[in-house]
Image: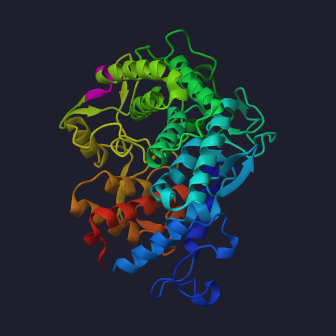
Amino acid sequence: MERRQFMQQAMMAGAALTLSSITRGVLGAPLVADFPVVRIPESQRKFKSKAVEALITKIQKDISNKELAWMFGNCFPNTLDTTVDFNMVDGKPDTYVITGDIDAMWLRDSSAQVWPYLRLVKEDKNLQQLIAGVIHRQAKNILLDPYANAFYKDASKESEWVKSDRTDMKPGIHERKWEIDSLCYPIRLSHGYWKETGDATPFDAQWVEAMQTVINTFITQQRFHGKGPYSFQRETAFATDTQPMGGYGYPVKPNGLICSMFRPSDDCTIYAYLIPSNFFAVESLLQLEEMGRAIPALSALVAPAGKLAAQVKKALDEHAKVQHGTLGKIYAFEVNGFGSYNLMDDANIPSLLSMPYLNAVSVDDPTYQATRKFVLSADNPFFFKGTAAEGVGGPHIGLDMIWPMSIVMRGLTSNDDKEIKWCLDTLQKTHADTGFMHESFHKDDPKHFTRSWFAWSNTIFGEFVWKVYRERPHLLKA
C-alpha cells in the first residue's frame, strides 16, 4: 500500500494513542519513571543488539529529562525492533529492511534507518553483520533496476502498482520512481561502514558492478545524449505521483547536472535538476573515489567517479545559486538549465536544510546559511508555523503538516545551543504522548498525525538525542 493511503489510518491512531489511554496495566511496568512501556515486547523484536541496549541503558540513566530518555529508548531501537529481516544467503549476510507500515525496502530509508548504529558496530559483531547484509541486498537491488526506489524481499513478487504505472516494471520491485538519492544512500552507508570497521568484505564483485551501474545511470541522466531509457507515468488523482511529457518530465537544458524525476519524498520534481540531490551525488561519488583509491579491488571506480563528481560540481557552481530579494545568493531547490528555478524546501532528506548533515556542503558556507534562513521562514512555501510548532513539511502530505524529521534536521545542522534546545523541546511536546516520532503532524494539533510506525523518523530522532548527549549533555536536563 502506498504511503498516502496510510494517512487517514495513522491520523485516527494518533487521536487514540495517548498516555492517558495507555496504562501500565495494559503494557507492563514502566521503563523510565512513570512512563508506560510502548516499545514492542522483547520476545517480538526482530533483532537484538547488546551495544544498542547498553547505550539505551546508559542514556536513560544519565540524562535528567526522563521523558526524552523514555522517547530515546522507544525510538532509537525501532528499526532493529520492528523492521529488519536478517539471513545468510549464499554464505553472505542479507538484510531486508522495511520502512515500518509498508512492507517494502527503500534504498534511501533502509540506509538511513541503520546509519546511526554504525558507531556501535565495533562493540557488536552481530550488528556489523546486519549492516553488511543491508549493503549486500542494496547492491542486489540496484542491479535489478537502478531506476527503482523500493523493492520486495521476494524477487518474484509483482507490485501493486503494475496496473497503474507506465514504466518498465519488473517482479521484485515495489515502486519505480527515479530519485538520485536512492543511489547515493547505499554509497553513504558503504563508505560509513568501511570507515568505521576497515572491513572491505561486503565490497565484492556484485557490489562493484552495482557501483558501476550507479555511475552509468548518473551519466545517462545528465541527458547529454537524449532523454535516456527511463520514463514514468501513473494513473492517479495525485499530480505529484506522475510525470508529464510522456513520462520524461518538463524539458531541461543539459549542463552537467543529473536529472531526478522524483524527490526523496517520492513526489515528482517540477524542474528535474534537484539541487540537494545533485550535491549529495557529488559527495557520494567522491566517497566512491576515496574507497577506490584505498581498496585495490575497487580501483576501476576511481577515474569515472572522480571525473563525474568534478563535472557535477562544476555545474552546481554555475547553476545552483539564485538571487533572493532580501537574503542575497541562496541555493535553489530545483532548476532546469533554461533559467527557471523553484524556491522551496521539503522535509525529506536530502533537502537544502540537510546538506551539511550529508557532508555535501559546509555548515559555515555563507550561501548555505542564507539558504537556511530562507528554508526556516515564511518565504519557503512549505514552512508551517502554528500554535503547536513550526517546521518544514512538503507536498507529499500537504499544507500545515510539519515533519518531525525537519525539526530533527534543524537540530542536527545547528551549532546554537538555544536552537538545539528548542528542537528537543518541540519534539518532546509534539509526539502526541505516544513516545514515538511520526511522519508529520498538524501545526496546531500534534495528535493529528500521519504514520504511527515510521522507523526512519524514529531512528533519526534517536541519532539526534545521542549526538546532543555526546556533545551538549547540558541540553538534556529536565
Can see residue 409? yes
The color scheme shown is rainbow
Residue 68's place in the image compared with 465, above or below, is below
Splitting the image into 4 quarters, where does residue 48 fall?
bottom right
Q: Residue sitting at 75 percent across and 46 percent down? A: 89
Residue 413's place in the image compared with 427, above or below, is above
Q: Residue furthest front?
A: 296
Splitting the image into 4 quarters, where does residue 247 fall?
top right
Q: Position of residue 229 (x, y in %)?
A: 64, 18
Q: Residue furthest bottom?
A: 25
Q: Residue sitting at 52 percent across and 46 percent down? A: 396
> In what quadrant of the picture does the C terminus appear?
bottom left
Splitting the image into 4 quarters, where does residue 424 fall?
bottom left
Q: Position of residue 295 (x, y in %)?
A: 49, 31
Residue 199's place in the image compared with 212, above or below, is below
Q: Position of residue 465 (x, y in %)?
A: 38, 65
Q: Position of residue 426 (x, y in %)?
A: 35, 66
Q: Is residue 464 left or right of 184 when viewed as pictured?
A: left
Say how many tags the image has. 0
Say whether residue 187 is magenta.
no
Write down the region rendered in magenta.
Answer: 318-322
Q: Residue sitting at 20 percent across and 33 percent down? A: 325
Can see residue 432? no
Q: Is residue 471 left or right of 68 when viewed as pictured?
A: left
